[in-house]
C-alpha cells in the first residue's frame, strides 16, 4: 500500500526518529543500571535491552529481516558509546539517579517508537488494530525487558499511572494521520507528542488506572 510506504517519512526523518528513540531508551536503561549500582557490563546490558528489545520483538512478529539494528549498525555503535561513557560517570562522583530522569527518557523513547512500530506494521499491510498493538509492543517491551533484568516488576504492568494506554492512544493518532493523508512528519509529530505528553502528564498529575483490590 503506497500510502503506508515508510519512505513517505523520508530517509533522514526515519533515521532521526530511530536514532533519537534509541538514544532515549538506551539512556533509560543506563540510568536504571546506575541507580541499581551495577557495573559497566550490567549497565550496558540494560542499555541494549531498553534500546533494542521492543523493536526486535516487533521485527520478529512482523517477520522483518534483517532486524532494524542489524540494518543500521550505527545504532549499535551509538549505544555502545553511551554505555562506554557511563564508565566515565561511574569513575567520577556518584550522584543519585532520580526516577524523573528515567521517566523522561522513557517517555520520549515511548512516543517515537510507538509511531515507528505502527508505521512498519502498516507497511506490512497489517489490520489497523494489529498495527496499533504493534506500536504498543515496540514502545513498551524494551522497558519491560529492562525492568525484568533489574529484578523489578515491569513499569508497564505495575505502575497504575497510564503507560501502555498512552502508547495505545498515540498509535491511533498515527493511524488517523494516515487516514487523513497528513504528511509523514506531521503524523509522526502528533502521535509521538501525544504519547509522550500523556505519559509525562500521567506521572506529573498522578493519574491512575483502577487496580485490583483483593
Image: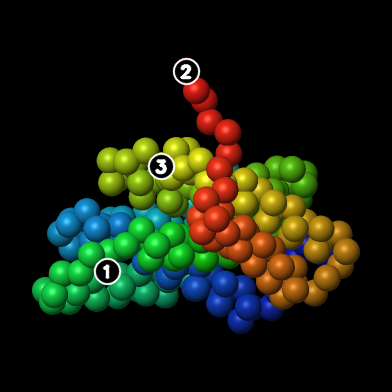
As drawn, 121 above or below 154: below
Task: For the residues labelled 1 and 3, say whether their Cβ atoms are less than 8 Å apart.
Answer: no
N-terminal of the pair, mark 2 or mark 1, is 1
Query: In the orientation shown, which residue stands out farthest toward the right?
Result: 180
**Element assignment for label 1:** helix
The CA span between labels 1 and 3 is 22 Å
Q: Position of residue 37 (x, y in %)?
A: 17, 57
Crowdedness near tag 2: few (<14), some (14–19) or many (≥20) residues, C-alpha within 10 Å: few
Q: Which residue is mark 2?
A: 214
Categorize mark 3 by other alpha carbons within 10 Å: few (<14), some (14-19), many (20+). Answer: some
Q: Secondary structure at mark 3?
A: loop
- Where disc 2 sits, the SS reads loop
Circle 1 residue: 83
**Mark 3 or 2: the one toward you:** 2
Q: Earlier in the sequence, mark 1 or mark 3?
A: 1
In the rendered structure, find residue 154 and report the number of the disc placed on it.
Answer: 3
> In 3D space, how far apart are the residues under numbered discs 3 and 2 (Cα atoms)?
21 Å
> Sequence order check: which comes first, mark 3 or mark 2?
3
How many residues crowd mark 1 within 10 Å: few (<14), some (14–19), many (20+)?
many
Amino acid at each position: 500500500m503506497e500510502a503506508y510506504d515508510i519512505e513517505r517519512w523520508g530517509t533522514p526523518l526515519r533515521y532521526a526518529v530511530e536514532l533519537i528513540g534509541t538514544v532515549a531508551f538506551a539512556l533509560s536503561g543506563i540510568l536504571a543500571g546506575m541507580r541499581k549500582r551495577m557495573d559497566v557490563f550490567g549497565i550496558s546490558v540494560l542499555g541494549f535491552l531498553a534500546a533494542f528489545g521492543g523493536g526486535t520483538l516487533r521485527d520478529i512478529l512482523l517477520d522483518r529481516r534483517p532486524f532494524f539494528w542489524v540494518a543500521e549498525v550505527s545504532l549499535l555503535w551509538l549505544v555502545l558509546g553511551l554505555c562506554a561513557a557511563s564508565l566515565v560517570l561511574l569513575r567520577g562522583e556518584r550522584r543519585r539517579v532520580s526516577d524523573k530522569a528515567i521517566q523522561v527518557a522513557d517517555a520520549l523513547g515511548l512516543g517515537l517508537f510507538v509511531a515507528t512500530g505502527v508505521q512498519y506494521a502498516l507497511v506490512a499491510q497489517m489490520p489497523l488494530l494489529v498495527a496499533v498493538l504493534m506500536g504498543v509492543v515496540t514502545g513498551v517491551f524494551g522497558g519491560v525487558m529492562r525492568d525484568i533484568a533489574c529484578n523489578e516488576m515491569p513499569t508497564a504492568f505495575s505502575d497504575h499511572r497510564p503507560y501502555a494506554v498512552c502508547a495505545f492512544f498515540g498509535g491511533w493518532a498515527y493511524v488517523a494521520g494516515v487516514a487523513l493523508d497528513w504528511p509523514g512528519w506531521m503524523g509522526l509529530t502528533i502521535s509521538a507528542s501525544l504519547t509522550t505528553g500523556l505519559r509525562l502528564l500521567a506521572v506529573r498529575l498522578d493519574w491512575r488506572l483502577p487496580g485490583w483490590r483483593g
